[in-house]
Amino acid sequence: MAALGGGGRAVTLLRRGLVLGPAPRRYRYKKKWAATAPRVPSTRLALQSFDMNYGLQLKEAWPSVRVSLLCEQKYGALVNSFADADRVAQELELLNAVDFISGAAQKAQRLQQDSAVEQAGRGSASREAPGERWAVKQAETPPLLSAPITSNIRCYTFPRGDITRFRPARPDTLGILNYYLMDAASLLPVLALNVQPDDFVLDLCAAPGGKTLAILQTGFCGHLAANDVSISRTKRLHQILNSYVPKQIRETVCVTSWDGRNWGELEGGTFHKVLVDVPCTTDRHSVMEEDNNIFNRRRSKERQMLPMLQLQLLVKSSLRSLKKRFLRKLLLWRWKCPCDA
Ligand SMILES: C[S@@+](CC[C@H](N)C(=O)[O-])C[C@H]1O[C@@H](n2cnc3c(N)ncnc32)[C@H](O)[C@@H]1O
């Protein structure tokens, strides 16, 4: 100790351990890199993942899809046929909103007519009877695409470029709300379902219930089963049914909270049509909100398991829940699907 020099003071310091010894416990700290490194927000992780995946899949369409994902959502107003639907439709038309479903139906009809004329023209050049090839073509077209669009569903949107917002829905004299605000694209699977009179329909992942409500708007369901594994979200589904559907119709809907993966074993071979709106990465929510974001690092396992869950819901349950006749039709259609060509 004396070799350090500095006399008695240095010796005292050394004795107290202030010069060479370890710092007193209260001054010691441990570097915690994980805690102190800036966290990447889940919304940014979501956007990075979409840039990588959708960029590859959608190619040049991705930038415009990306912009719309990051913009404020534009809603459609699904007219409630259980309220005074004609009056509601008139009011919406006065606001300059248009029913995109009837518009699309007219467009589809025009396209079909044009295509029929074209096919007949080509057919007459060959030895086939005029229109014969068109008939064959129609028979080959998947039923989901050739089906007429269910006219009972009306959904109004403001034209492109018009960013007016719909006012919140209002109740009629019986307390039934006049329209339901939803992403207009969410109606497409319901239209593709092409519900026919007395069909038994299963909505396997139904909550909060926008598509369940749209299925009921067709007025065709013989029986509707609406299921969702989440009890809290099933409560929202009940609230929507209470606000939009009269009691006598509401009571015909069977609402359950089962794990949809087991449905095929519970009620196999029962339904004509099954809608499976599988849990997904909720893209718009994921790029906009930190709360309950599936791209949060703590939820990565759940996110990685999503494709497996989706597959199980689709294959293990939904296909098994279909009546055999409809399953055969679906498989046959898949086998001949023109998009494979
Ligand atoms: C995309 S949302 C459905 C939205 C709904 N179809 C609508 O139009 O309002 C997916 C739903 O799947 C549900 N879900 C997740 N796992 C499920 C499972 N194993 N069985 C049934 N439902 C499940 C979630 O609770 C969630 O409500």
Image: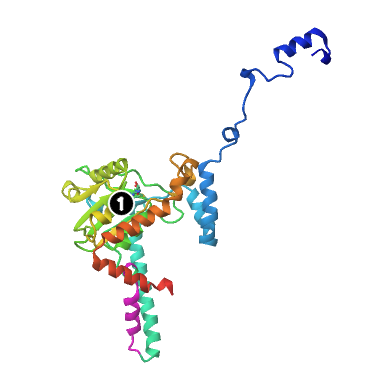
Asked whether mark 1 and ligand 1 are closer than 8 Å, the reply comes as: yes
Asked which quadrant contains residue 199, the reply is bottom left
Q: Is residue 140 left or right of residue 16?
A: left
The stretch drawn in magenta includes residue 168: no
| x and y percentages locating residue 119 in the rendered image | 38, 82
The stretch drawn in magenta includes residue 143: yes
Element carrying mark 1: helix
Question: Residue at image x 36%, y 64%?
Answer: 104
| x and y percentages locating residue 37 in the rendered image | 60, 35
Q: Nearer the viewer, residue 158 or 39?
A: 39
| x and y percentages locating residue 108 in the rendered image | 36, 69
Q: Nearer the viewer, residue 124 or 92?
A: 124
What is the three-letter code of the residue carrying label 1? Gly
Which residue appears farthest toward the left when viewing the image?
248
For the N terminus, the image quarter is top right
Report the number of discs: 1
Asked which quadrant contains residue 231, the reply is top left
Q: Nearer the viewer, residue 259 or 255?
A: 259
For the C terminus, the image quarter is bottom left
Q: Residue under circle 1?
A: 260
What span is in magenta?
128-144
Q: Is residue 247 visible?
A: yes
Our reading of the magenta stretch's main secondary structure is helix
Q: Is residue 285 visible?
A: no
